[in-house]
Amino acid sequence: MKAYDVAVIGAGPGGYVAAIRCAQLGLRTVCIDDREKGGKPAPGGTCLNVGCIPSKALLESSENYEKARLEFSSHGILIREMAVDLAKMQARKSSIVDAHTNGISFLFRKNRVESILGRARLKAIGEHCVVEVALGDRTERLEAKHVIIATGSSPRKLEGAIFGSRIVDSSGALAFEEIPEKLGIIGAGVIGLELGSVWRRLGSEVTLLEASPEFLSLADEKISKEALRQFGKEPGWTINLGMKVLSVNEMGKSVKVIYEHSGGTAEKDFDRLIVAAGRIPNSKDIADDDLGLNIDDRGFIEVDRHCRTNLPNVYAIGDVVQGAMLAHKASEEGVMVAELIDGQKPEIDPHLMPWVIYTSPEIAWVGKTERQLKSEGIEYRAGQFPFSANGRAQALGDARGFVKMLADANTDRVLGVHIIGPFASELISEAVVAMAFSASSEDIARTIHAHPSLCEALHEASLAVEGRALHI
Ligand code: FAD
Ligand code: NAI
C-alpha cells in the first residue's frame, strides 16, 4: 500500500488548496477527486467546473451584451447590428474553465502533489488511516497519517422536479444551448439571482419563485431593499416572494409549475426551469459506518473551529462542514488545516468572511448587519454614501447603490460594511483588510483614497459615520 503524510479527498477550492499548502510544508500529499473530463482528472471541484468561474464568465459576456445594447449609445458608440452567438459564448466559458483545470494540474505537478482520479472512502483510522479509491471496477487502497475530507456539496433536489433537459440544476443552467424564452427559477438566492441575470440579459423573461417572504435575507436589510428596487427596474425580471411550489411537471416542450401565492393558487409554464433551492453537503458514504464519523442532521460533517472531526487525524473543510458555502472559505480552511498538521497555530475569523453576489449592481458585504447588531444589543453608528455622488461611478455610467458602514458607537471599531453598486466585489476587500486590522471608521476616514475612484465612496461612508461626509 502506498503511504502518504496527507490524503485529501476532493480537489475543489478546499481540497486542492489544502493539498498544495501541505506539499509546500514538505508533507507527502495525495489528492483524490472523482471529477473527470475526457477520461482525465478535472480538478477544481464545483467552483471551477460548474460554479464560480463558468458563472462569472457568462455573467461577464451577458453584461457586455446588455451594455452594448442599452448603454453604448449614451457614450456615442452606435452599433447597427448586434446578435448573440451563444455557442461562442459557451466556448469562451469552457476554455476559461479548461485553462484553469490545466493550471491546477500544473500546480499539483510543480508542488509534487500526487493526483488520483477516483471515488474515495475512509476505511480505517488511527496512526495510519486507510483510504480506498474506486475507479470503475478497480479499487486501490492507500495509507495516510492525516486525512482531509473536502468533498463539497451538490444541488438540493426538489420533490417532483426531475432533472433532465428542461428542469435543470445550476450546472444545467450554465450549459443551455439556446436562450430560453420563458425561464422559471425556484429560489431567489445567490444562484437564482446570478444565473437569472445571465439569461435575462440575453433575452429570457425570468420569473423567480421564492419561498421566503423576505428578499435576500442574509444581506443587510437596506441592501436587500435597494437590490429589489434596482432589479424591479430591469425589464425581464418577475420576482415572486413568499410562494410555495405545489407541483412541477414537465409537459412536452414546457414545464408547468403550480404554486401557492397570496392565499391563492397560481400556475406558470416555462421553457426551462432552474432549481436553485440551496445545496447539500456531500457527506454520504465518505467513511465506513463503523468508524463513527459524526454528521449532523443536515448532513454536515461536525467539526470544531479548527476543522477537526471527532475522528483522530481526520479533518473536514469547505462546503461539507457548517458555515458559508463559499470557495474562499473552503480554501482558507484548507490552508489552516495544512498548517495545523504542520504543527503551526493558524486561526480563521469567520466573522471576516466576505460575501459577493455578482448581479448588476453587485452586492458585497462583510461583518454584521444592522439587524444582527440590534439583536445582539450592540450600540452602533451608521454612515452611508451613494455612488451617485461619486465621480468615477458617474464616469463609468453606473452610479446605482451605496456604501454603508457600521461602527461600534463606543469604540468606533468597524463592525460591518455593506455595498451595493459598481465593482462592490472588489471594493469589499478594503473593508475586510481594515476590519482584519481592527480599524475604526476614523482610521479609514484618515486614509488617503485615490481620486477619482470608487473606493472614495467607502472613504465617504467612513466620514459619514461621524456625520462629516464631504461630497453629500
Ligand atoms: P467542491 O468545490 O464541491 O469540490 C469537492 C470535490 O470533491 C468535487 O470535485 C467532487 O466531485 C469531489 N468529491 C466528492 N466526493 C468525493 C469522493 N468520495 N471521492 C473523491 N472525490 C469526491 N463561491 C464563491 O465563493 N464565489 C462564487 O462566485 C461562487 N459561485 C458559485 C456559482 C455556482 C453556480 C455554484 C454552484 C457555486 C458557487 N460558489 C461560489 C460556491 C463554491 O463553488 C463552493 O463553495 C466551493 O466550490 C466549495 O468548495 P469545496 O472544495 O468545499 O467543494
Ligand atoms: P441559497 O441558499 O443562496 O438560496 C436558495 C433560495 O431558495 C433561498 O432563498 C430559499 O429560501 C429558496 N428556497 C428553498 N426551497 C425553496 C422552495 N421549495 N421553493 C422556493 N424557494 C425555495 O442557495 P443557492 O442559490 O442554491 O446557492 C447555494 C450556495 O452556493 C449559496 O448559498 C452560496 O453559498 C453558494 N454560491 C455563492 C455564490 C457567490 O459567492 N457569488 C454564487 C452562487 C452560489
Image (cartoon, grey):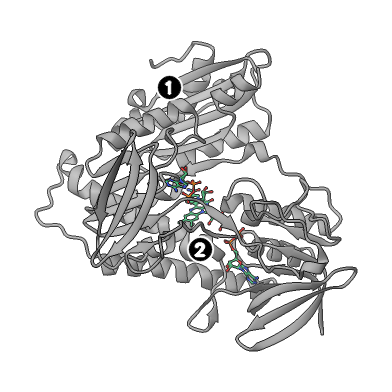
Could one spot residue 26 in this view of the protein?
no
Image position of 454 with respect to 445: above or below: below
Q: Note whether ligand 2 is within 8 Å of mark 1.
A: no
Q: Where the C terminus falls, by quadrant?
A: top left
Q: Provide the secondary structure element on which disc 2 rests.
A: helix
Image x and y of residue 3, in percent: 82, 79
Q: Residue lying at the far front in this picture: please name it.
A: 264
Percent from the top left, x then y, of residue 278?
A: 50, 51
Residue 330 on image: x %, y %:
63, 54
Question: Which of the pair 286/411 is nearer the observer?
Answer: 286
Q: Disc number at residue 146?
A: none
In this picture, residue 273 sits left or right of residue 69: right
Q: Quadrant of the N terminus?
A: bottom right
Q: Nearer the viewer, residue 427 or 116?
A: 116
Q: Residue at x 34, y 34 (%)?
A: 263
Q: Amino acid at mark 2?
A: Leu
Asked if ligand 1 lies within 8 A of label 2, the reply is yes
Percent of width and height locating residue 293: 78, 61
The quarter of the picture where residue 341 lies is: bottom right
42, above or below 12, in the image: below
Q: Residue furthest bottom?
A: 137
Q: Nearer the viewer, residue 393 or 309?
A: 309
Indicate the quadrant where residue 22 lies: bottom right
Q: Regarding mark 1 in the picture, which secondary structure is present there?
A: strand
Going by the picture, which residue comes out furthest to the left?
80
Q: Mark 2 to mark 1: distance in Å?
A: 35 Å
The residue that disc 1 covers is 385
Q: Disc 2 or disc 1, which is closer to the eye?
A: 2
Residue at which label 2 appears = 48
- Going by the numbered disc 1, the residue's amino acid type is Phe
